Image (cartoon, rainbow, N blue to C red):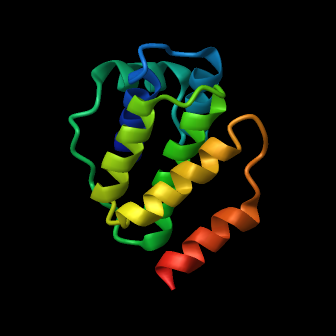
Amino acid sequence: MQKHSLIRILGEMSKIDNLLDEVELAYIFQVGAFLGFTEGEVRALMASGSSGHIPVPSSEKDRMTVLYHLLFLMKVDKNISDAEKALVHHYGLKLGFSALMIQDFLNLIEHHAHKRVPEEAMLEIIKKYLN
């Protein structure tokens, strides 16, 4: 995936509930830094918005990475809205994942909204649908 697109999509996600939390912003800055962006570049990308178009990565690993970023951004402020869940579902389908798998991830994240998500539980969902 183009790294610019990922930041724009995360920016869209952070604004979907009309509340840009500082924790969400810090998470996006962290992802941006990992991708080689400065905070200023991240802010500019977020301000430019997402076109709703997502260039779908060719590798399954890259598609899962995008989905993970969306799921964890949704969770980071401990306030999971219906609008956030709908956006994760929307982009999850565009990334080629089944609606059932996306729903299982959303349920898992919601169940662990105030605590750490067990890595094993996420892996079990992946095994269930991708193997």
Decide: is 121 above or below 105.
below
Q: Nearer the viewer, residue 122 or 33?
A: 122
The x, y position of residue 79, in whole percent, is 60, 26
Quadrant hosting residue 49: top left
Q: Which quadrant holds the N terminus?
A: bottom left
Name the residue located 53 percent from the left edge and 59 percent from the top edge.
Answer: 104
> How many numbered marks are there?
0
Quadrant hosting residue 63: bottom left
The x, y position of residue 65, in whole percent, is 52, 57
Name the residue located 50 percent from the left edge and 69 percent from the top edge.
Answer: 61
Give the residue at the far bottom of this rendering: 131
| Left or right of 96, for residue 10 | right
Name the residue located 65 percent from the left edge and 72 percent from the top edge.
Answer: 124
Q: Is residue 4 visible?
A: no
| Left or right of 2, for residue 108 | right
The x, y position of residue 116, in whole percent, is 78, 45
| Left or right of 67, for residue 110 | right
Q: Nearer the viewer, residue 111 or 126?
A: 111
Decide: is 30 above or below 77.
below
Decide: is 127 above or below 112.
below
Decide: is 13 above or below 92.
above
The x, y position of residue 11, in whole percent, is 42, 28
Q: Is residue 24 visible?
A: yes
